[in-house]
Image (tube, rainbow, N blue to C red):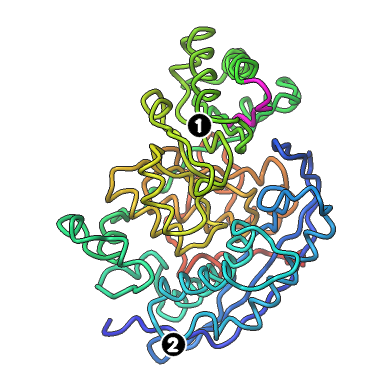
Amino acid sequence: MESWDCRVLDASVRFVHQPFRVPLRLSTGAIAEITEARAEVRVQIAGREAAGQGSIYLSDLWAWPDPQLDHTERDRVLRRFCEELAGDLPRHTGEPAHPLELGLRLHHAALHRACIPNPTALARSMCASPFDAALHDAAGQALGCSAFAFYDTPFSSPSADPLWSPAAAAQAGSAATAIRRLLRPEPKRALAAWIIVGPHDSFDRDVAPWIRERGYHCFKLKVAARDPEEDAHFAARVYRETHRLGARNIRLCADPNGAYPGPEAAVRFLDTLQATDPDAYAAFEYIEQPAGREVTVRPHDWRAVAQRRPVLLDEGLTDLDILPLAREQGWSGFALKTCKGHSFALVAAAWAATHGRAIALQDLTNPGLSFIHAALFAAFVPTLNDVELNSPQFTPAANAGWVSHLPQLFEPRDGRHRLPKVLPPGLGSVGLRPDRDDG
């Protein structure tokens, strides 16, 4: 098409309370209930108008674990921040431009918007993410194509293009070129299914049904992160117990949620796991964000860990200027999440591919439409793990309206999420509508 110029006309957001079937335990605490933010954005592109949808959980305990504020207060601030973003979205996104550029402008505006109390950068990008998804969904609906088809022709992105220096121009001289080279020409339709296993879980009660009834063999370990040797013994036990329960071709990764003091603890974890159970060590694929999130003020050298297994920056990756810094610090790559923004995640993935970094696609217990968004992202963007989608494990009721339309996606039976043969326009809100609305 001649121009990708897209204008945001207006936006709105509403909130849905979602209880967890069982608590999700992080190193910062346990999540038993959560707010889902559902955004709608109306855009104009190529002389057409359309409204798109996006959603995300406002996971305050993950994104903003401030002990001075309780969950109720943090949730209230995040809801208000979403409402303010909705009211000012046309101003934040500015003059017409490619949807990717609009999403990056929104990301920047969210990070720098005044708010009291002041949520973290991670929490702010989380609040902006359903609007970014919704504007891409709307543009795709208006054009009648997938949001991953927006990169077939060149365009400029002043917010992202400076990341591609002249030295990298031989590979990709702009964000648009890099993203086009990153995306699969045909989407991957079968995606590995992962569940979370924590130290408090019962293997026979909490894990066995996923293996025996649905064929799961990929396990993300939410380690306690108090003692890396204890965590390694837990990882070895997960390997042995899941094998006992019938899992084969077992795949493991671990997430300390930034609770280790530094790289030495991650090396101890790997050393102990290798010594304790070489088979479990062979099945172990990567570790996410072992130590603190403040990578700009408390940097570590991760090369000793990266020589053993990929070590991926997750919560510490909140802005594009952190990408080159992460490479300097020895991170193997990034654990991306759509909850940081569709545009941000695409640019980060393309930058990683340009610079030989690894990426995985992780979760925020994405329900419903955000589940579909993450699955579509993994279908087009090559990753180490395909995608983690754990809402069937923790908030299945939030998916109830979608299951009858996409049972093979939301309820995998052979250890794979499967996308339909015909993919929807945008990011999935039209053509894959739920048969009921829990809002």
Residue type, label 2 = Glu
Across and down, in percent, residue 184 comes to 31, 53
Residue found at x 40% / y 40%: 329
Mark 2, Cα crowd under 10 Å, few <14 / some 14-19 / many 20+, is: few
Across and down, in percent, residue 6 comes to 42, 83
Marked residue nearer the N-terminal end (1 or 2): 2
Q: Residue furthest front?
A: 297
Specify the quadrant that holds the N terminus.
Answer: bottom left
Q: Is residue 113 visible in this depiction of the protein? A: yes
Q: Dot 1 corresponds to which residue?
A: 287
| Residue 179 to residue 290: above or below | below
Residue closest to the eye, 422 or 302: 302
Q: Is residue 408 visible in this depiction of the protein? A: no
Secondary structure of the residue carrying tag 1 is strand
Q: Magenta part of the protein: which range?
A: 220-227
Asked whether 4 falls inside the magenta stretch, the response is: no
Q: Main secondary structure of the magenta part?
A: loop
Residue 95's tag is: 2
Across and down, in percent, residue 92 comes to 54, 80
